[in-house]
Image (cartoon, grey):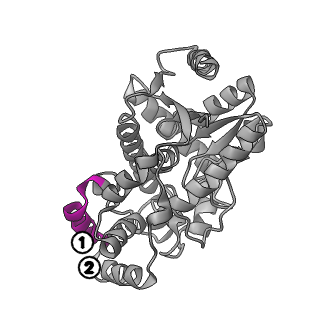
């Protein structure tokens, strides 16, 4: 059985992934499957830079704005949902364009990881959450670094949900999440993938884009949106969104608005660095550079054309 050809548009936040993915979809009869772990949530529009209807330019977008913020949503659920989308898009003769900056989503979907083996255990998870509340998530993160350093290296120490999940898998199976993923890849991927990664030769130009985006978000109503979501329940994975927790100290009178926005810009830059590190592991990626190639969209489309014809 022939593998489905998939275009993956990846890169750091504010790099222009959405725009490039849409241009590719327009040129080759494609539809976009989002790989953004925060754009899935309903209502969280500004902080997550969710594309507007105008920005989509009539191109269908899947897996955006469909999960309630109170709900948890796992990587395994994302893989199941995105696989279904890709199969449907391909069956209709369209080109699937996976676009987003959540590396764990992209790799879990396109590298062939099977999440069917991963058990759930409410009691174990409850115990780990109680430990995090009493001792802090940093304690759990240190434990994960001992047990599964590879998984820990891909997570931020404040990402309590995924730290707990990785520990849960180990305590239930006796194997680390890394070992489980290696096993699950044995059947290989269902997809033939072209990875297009947006990078910047001058990192400062990317940082300038990030700062400008934050300023535009504020003008678009970020503060009002953040007020509605800063107190999301701990169980919700939506609470990890950059843009709300950084503003929380301002709303509670613990820092000025300028200080909070400076912190938001700093955290977004740090996130961009982690994304770049993640996607650079894809040795087969094809990079385009908006700050050095005026025609980077044309270059990307030419590469896509060669890939689809090959």
Residue 155 - label: none
**Residue at 35 percent of width and 65 percent of height:** 166
Q: Do the numbered discs 1 and 2 sit on residues whose CB atoms are within 8 Å?
A: yes
Q: Residues within 10 Å of mark 1 (few under 14, many from 20)?
A: few
The Cα–Cα distance between marks 1 and 2, rounded to whole angstroms, is: 6 Å
Residue 59 appears in view:
yes
Residue 262 appears in view:
no
User: What residue did someone put label 2 on?
Assistant: 135
**Residue at 49 percent of width and 29 percent of height:** 198
Foreground residue, 75 or 193? 193
Is residue 86 shown above or below 291?
below
Q: Which residues are magenta?
A: 137-150
Foreground residue, 281 or 157? 281
**Residue at 68 percent of width and 27 percent of height:** 23
Split into 4 quadrants, where in the image is the C terminus? top right
User: What residue did someone put label 1 on?
Assistant: 139
Foreground residue, 105 or 17? 105
């Amino acid at each position: 059985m022939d593998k489905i050809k998939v275009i993956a548009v990846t890169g750091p936040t504010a790099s222009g992934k959405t725009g490039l993915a849409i241009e590719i979809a327009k040129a080759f009869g494609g539809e976009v499957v989002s790989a953004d772990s925060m754009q899935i949530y309903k209502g969280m529009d500004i902080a997550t830079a969710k594309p507007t209807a105008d920005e989509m330019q009539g191109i269908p977008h899947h897996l955006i704005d469909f999960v309630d913020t109170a709900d948890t949503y796992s990587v395994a659920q994302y893989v199941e949902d995105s696989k279904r989308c890709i199969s449907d898009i391909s069956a209709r003769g369209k080109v699937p364009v996976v676009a987003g900056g959540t590396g764990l989503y992209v790799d879990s979907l396109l590298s062939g990881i099977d999440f069917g083996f991963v058990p759930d255990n409410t009691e174990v998870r409850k115990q780990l959450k109680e430990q995090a509340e009493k001792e802090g998530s940093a304690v759990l993160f240190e434990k994960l670094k001992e047990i599964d350093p590879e998984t820990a290296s891909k997570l931020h120490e404040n990402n309590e949900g995924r730290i707990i999940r990785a520990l849960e898998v180990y305590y239930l199976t006796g194997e680390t999440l890394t070992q489980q993923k290696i096993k699950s890849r044995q059947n290989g991927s269902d997809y033939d993938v072209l990875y297009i990664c947006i990078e910047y030769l001058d990192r400062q130009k990317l940082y300038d884009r990030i700062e400008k985006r934050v300023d535009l978000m504020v003008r678009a109503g970020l503060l009002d949106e953040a007020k509605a979501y800063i107190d999301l329940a701990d169980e919700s994975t939506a609470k990890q969104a950059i843009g709300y927790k950084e503003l929380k100290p301002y709303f509670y009178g613990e820092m000025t608005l300028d200080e909070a926005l400076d912190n938001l810009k700093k955290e977004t830059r740090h996130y961009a660095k982690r994304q770049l590190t993640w996607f650079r592991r894809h040795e087969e990626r094809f990079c385009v550079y908006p700050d050095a190639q005026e025609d980077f969209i044309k270059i990307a489309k030419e590469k896509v054309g060669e890939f689809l014809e090959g």
